[in-house]
Image: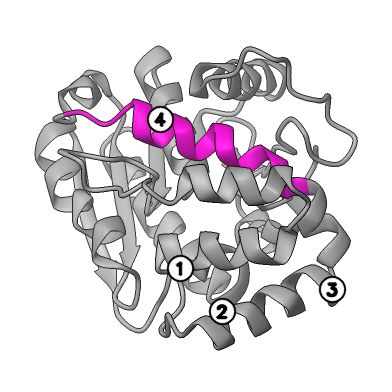
Amino acid sequence: MVVPGNNRRAHHYERLARGLAGVHAVHVVERRGRGASEARAAAYSVETEADDVLAVMERTGARVVFGHSYGGLIALHVGLRQPLDALIAYEPGVSIGGSFDASWLDAFTQQLGDGRQVAAMATFLRGTDLLPSRARPLLWAISLLMLRGSGGRETRDMMPTTPAEIGEVARLDSDGSRYAGIAARTLLLGGEKSPAYLTGVLPQLATIVPSAEYTILPGLDHNAPDLNAPDTIAQQIRLHLVRGERHGYVDHGIEASLPST
């Protein structure tokens, strides 16, 4: 089961799914507020997302969950609620001791509400520090390209989901001890080129989650699973599952499959 991150659709993980599909059945969730999936209700929390993932798992028989970014946070909360054969998260949206700075969220939400989408995207990119440069002209140029170029309409349609998701990351800020309840064999992945606040929580989580390990992958950034290195991430997932097989993990329903909603 693959759980997309913020501002991502199921199809963004097609290459990752193809990298796994030769050995495993792969299902990519199209999260609420995206594509043909239902719109979000007024009441929202990460548990709403976990409910959806658990429902798809029950339908498909999936016992392994991978989550990217905010999808990684969802995956962790799925792991708290149901035993899994394995859990893998790439830079999950977890805040420990205030590690995630959401001070930009109010400005983003206001700009979005005012219809200033380019300004909102620039605020998002600056606040999340996902680009190597924070120079305002460059951020505006990239924001304009993201919103007006190929896939721009899709990005614009997803932007209203961001305030609630970032709000959940901030609301769930803690010492991380809640994740001690995850029983699954857990692999936490991060990229060498990603911001420190995304990778810095990984060793902390690895000491909290009883059966967890973490790896920082050289040369990769936050968009490795969906854009820049999905084959590398698929390989890491496969290796984690092979190690699990040596410790008694059994894949439930091995078959070739492409992403499904």
Closer to the N terminus: mark 3 or mark 2? 2
Q: Are marks 1 and 2 in contact (CB under 8 Å)?
A: yes
Q: How crowded is mark 2: few (under 14 residues within 10 Å), some or many (20 or more)?
A: many
- As rendered, which of 237 and 32 lies closer to the eye? 32
Question: Dot 3: what SS?
Answer: helix
User: Disc 3 marks which amino acid?
Assistant: Arg
C-alpha separation, residue under disc 1 versus residue under disc 2: 7 Å
Tell me which segment is drawn in magenta: 158-174
- As rendered, which of 81 and 34 lies closer to the eye? 34
- State the image coordinates of residue 217 (x, y, percent, origin top left): 31, 73
C-alpha separation, residue under disc 3 versus residue under disc 2: 14 Å
Of labels 4 and 3, the one closer to you: 3
C-alpha separation, residue under disc 1 versus residue under disc 3: 19 Å
- State the image coordinates of residue 128 (x, y, percent, origin top left): 42, 61
What's the mark number on residue 139? 2
Side (left or right) of 160 relative to 156: left
Residue under pointer 4: 85
Q: Is residue 32 above or below residue 127?
A: above
Closer to the N terminus: mark 4 or mark 3? 4
Could you tell me which residue is drawn at 24 percent across and 26 percent down? 179
User: Disc 4 marks which amino acid?
Assistant: Asp
Side (left or right) of 209 relative to 94: left
Of labels 4 and 2, the one closer to you: 2
User: Disc 2 marks which amino acid?
Assistant: Leu
Closer to the N terminus: mark 4 or mark 1? 4
Q: Name the quarter where the C terminus is drawn.
A: top right
Side (left or right) of 139 relative to 240: right
